Image (tube, rainbow, N blue to C red):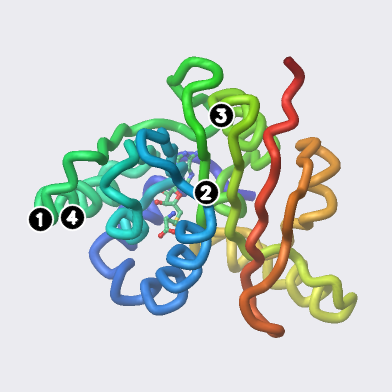
């Protein structure tokens, strides 16, 4: 099981080496989704679990981006990027994604890359993402989900306790998430046939 305190500790530990380890895997996928989101001038974007801000250089300067994260140390790395590149269109807040401190219907796009299997309660996080997203807005998720292949799924269940110790779970089922979080999927696909991560675009189908 993942717990907020252990997540904070684990990601504080990753913060200095995160970009060196994960950028090669995560950045191309972030680039693909952010380029595909159809961000319009003046749009407000929420990047949930923004981490070290790997995704931040990918947002057009004509939109307004807010990044939130639980980890002060990860946010500090993101802040350095903002200062270095003078990203005046981006702001950061320390915040728990399962309790977002924003009004309902604030953002045009809400994105979470490589976060949903890190949080203790993914369904709550998605309900918060929907709440703060405008009714006609879009929800974007990039994540590893449990394989459809029964043999690989069993291995993912078996290694899950080890994965949790290093900062994410390996057994999150997209089908369960869709059902439990009432996600209305527009598109779900992998960038490569055997990719570990899935791209999910969802409509914001929250009740009026
Ligand atoms: C694997 S990193 C992904 C970071 C970034 N989205 C990326 O694509 O590089 C997961 C991030 O989620 C953050 N996180 C975990 N639980 C969170 C929560 N409940 N609220 C906000 N951020 C959280 C962690 O601190 C960490 O920065």
Where on the picture, by quarter, is residue 202? Answer: top right
Using the image, determine if residue 61 lies above or below residue 131.
below
Q: CA distance from mark 2 to mark 3?
A: 13 Å
Could you tell me which residue is drawn at 32 percent across and 36 percent down?
64
Could you tell me which residue is drawn at 23 percent across and 64 percent down?
16
In the image, the residue with mark 4 has its CB under 8 Å from the nearest atom of ligand 1: no
Q: CA distance from mark 1 to mark 4?
A: 5 Å
Image coordinates for residue 169, horizontal then vertical, percent: 63, 59
Can you tell which of label 4 and label 3 is closer to the viewer? Answer: 3
Q: CA distance from mark 3 to mark 1?
A: 29 Å
Q: What numbered label is drawn on residue 133?
A: 3
| Disc 3 + disc 1, Cβ < 8 Å | no
Using the image, determine if residue 100 lies above or below residue 33.
above
Q: What numbered label is drawn on residue 81?
A: 4
Evaluate whether residue 114 shows in this view.
no
Residue position marked by numbered label 2 in the rendering: 112
Q: CA distance from mark 4 to mark 2?
A: 19 Å
Q: Is label 2 in a helix, a strand or a loop?
A: strand
Q: What numbered label is drawn on residue 208?
A: none
Residue position marked by numbered label 1 in the rendering: 84
Q: Is label 1 in a helix, a strand or a loop?
A: helix
């Amino acid at each position: 099981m993942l717990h907020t305190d252990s997540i904070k500790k684990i990601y504080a530990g990753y913060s200095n080496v995160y970009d060196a380890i994960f950028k090669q895997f995560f950045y191309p996928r972030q680039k693909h989704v952010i380029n595909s989101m159809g961000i319009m001038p003046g749009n407000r974007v929420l990047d949930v679990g923004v981490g070290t801000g790997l995704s931040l250089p990918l947002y057009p300067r004509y939109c307004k981006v807010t990044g939130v994260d639980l980890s002060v140390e990860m946010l500090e790395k993101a802040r350095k990027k903002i200062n270095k590149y003078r990203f005046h269109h981006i702001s950061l807040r320390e915040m728990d994604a399962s309790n977002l401190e924003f009004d309902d219907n604030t953002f045009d796009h809400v994105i979470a890359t490589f976060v949903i299997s890190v949080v203790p309660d993914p369904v709550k996080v998605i309900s918060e993402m929907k709440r703060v997203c405008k009714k006609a807005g879009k929800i974007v998720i990039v994540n590893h989900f449990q394989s459809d292949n029964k043999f690989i799924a069993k291995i993912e269940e078996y290694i899950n306790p080890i994965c949790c110790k290093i900062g994410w779970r390996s057994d999150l089922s997209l089908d369960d998430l869709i059902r439990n979080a009432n996600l209305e999927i527009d598109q779900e696909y992998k960038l490569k046939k055997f990719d570990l991560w899935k791209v999910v675009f969802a409509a914001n189908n929250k009740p009026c």
